[in-house]
Amino acid sequence: MLVRFWGTRGSLPVARPALAVQGKIARALVAASGRKFNDELEAHAWARNNLPFHTYGSYGGASSCVEIEGADGAFIVCDMGSGLREFGLDAARRCADGHPRVYHFFMSHLHWDHIMGFPFFGPAFDPGAEIVVHAGHPDAEQALRRQQEEISFPVPFDWLRARFTFITHQPGETFQAAGLTVSMIGQHHSHESYGYRFERDGRAVIYSTDSEHKLDNMESEKAFEHFFRDADLVICDTMYSLGDTVSLKQDWGHSSNVVAIDLCHAARAKRLALFHHEPTYSDRDIQHMHAESIRYEELVRADRPPLEVICAYDGLEVRV
Amino acid sequence: MDLRWQVSVESGRVVGVPAGRVDETTWEAFTGHLTAAVKEAAANGAPLVVDLSGLDYMSSRGLRALTIARREAGETVAITLAAPNARMREILAISRYDKLFKIADSVESDI
Ligand SMILES: [Zn+2]
Ligand SMILES: [Zn+2]
């Protein structure tokens, strides 16, 4: 399987203002001062190896949208955040090259940051496209229709030309979709959310976002340890610090890097992708949080196998 | 991995001393000891000091157990974390628990 991140930001998409870009350029110029580059290629090569990701790159700012490739040929997409627009453009390119026009969506939940890309999803207008929406919520269709009502958007849902199917699944149920074995777990979040486990050929990818692991219900984490068991990649909501989730941001429905690492350790998962980044965080803040997460994993690893902690960014591809 | 726990009343304070690790296998025992220590401190009208010096590390379960203990303690029992080793200090900083709890360099320095 290949996992491709189209949107990794939580709650609200963000775009860095000019000041942030200027800061990156100034830092890069200082770091490179005295050097001579014959062309942009040389400059890229040097920058890639010598500048921190927050200076040479960016985590991006699109909201939740993650693609999984490599099952029966259909597109597989988790959530319809603002990253879905870019995915739709790319999918149209791939369809022009012969890719089947079948899309399977898996919805964590229906909050705005997870559906806002849908009105801008080009393939929904393709009469040859088949779109299957898998959700734990019976009101998934209503959420997409309501978002396209005239008060919010000029194009009503009924003008879309693709063939739509909405399927509601029960937590605990295991089902086949698009050539994958899929199971679902209920998560603590406003109006509920659901995590997914995708399996194929002995490999497992978990998508678990907008999931609060509450203080007064730590017993329930055994269920998550089991759900994450031996996973090759766990994509986890790590929006806040642990301290925030038990104080000011308690009951906001999100989790922390520290809890995600502990769950992955107990589950013997191999790799964790930090995800659903806080919109007020700069690229530097996110990279700092990533470094702290790697350090925490070392501090509490003890005799467990190492867990690789990566930080998702818009455009990241992870082969599983 | 086991967790040991000792508790004593000294200089008008209840001092709890966990030793070993607090993780997903030991947090329930840790929570039980903490709750009992909070009750004892409340009965004595004394503050509670958790002496972390014998602790190898504590993961999020243990940290969250501390928050539960503090909620149980309410206004009546002040809780201080004392003498964290270097590893615990880093964990407290990364989790931002150093912003939520009073942390003393040693058990004595908190008197
Ligand atoms: Zn969200
Ligand atoms: Zn949400």
Image (cartoon, rainbow, N blue to C red):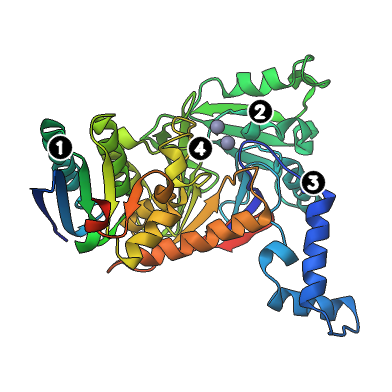
The amino acid pointed to by label 2 is: Phe
Residue A13 vs A149, above or below: the answer is: below
Q: Which residue is mark 2?
A: A164
Marks 2/3: CA–CA distance:
19 Å
Say few, some or many: other residues with alpha carbon within 10 Å of mark 2 (under 14 / 14 to 19 / 20 or more). Answer: some
Precedes in sequence: disc 3 or disc 4? 3
Q: Which residue is mark 3?
A: A89
Kindly state the secondary structure of the residue where label 2 is placed: strand
**Quadrant in the rendering for residue A124:** top right
Which quadrant would the N terminus of chain B be assigned to in this image? bottom left
The amino acid pointed to by label 4 is: Asp
Q: Which residue is mark 4?
A: A210
**Within 8 Å of ligand 2, the CB of disc 4?**
yes
Q: Are marks 3 and 4 on the same chain?
A: yes
Q: Chain of mark 4?
A: A
Marks 3/4: CA–CA distance:
26 Å
Q: Is residue A207 left or right of residue A301?
A: right
Q: Nearer the viewer, mark 1 or mark 4?
A: 1
Precedes in sequence: disc 2 or disc 3? 3
Q: Which residue is mark 1?
A: B41
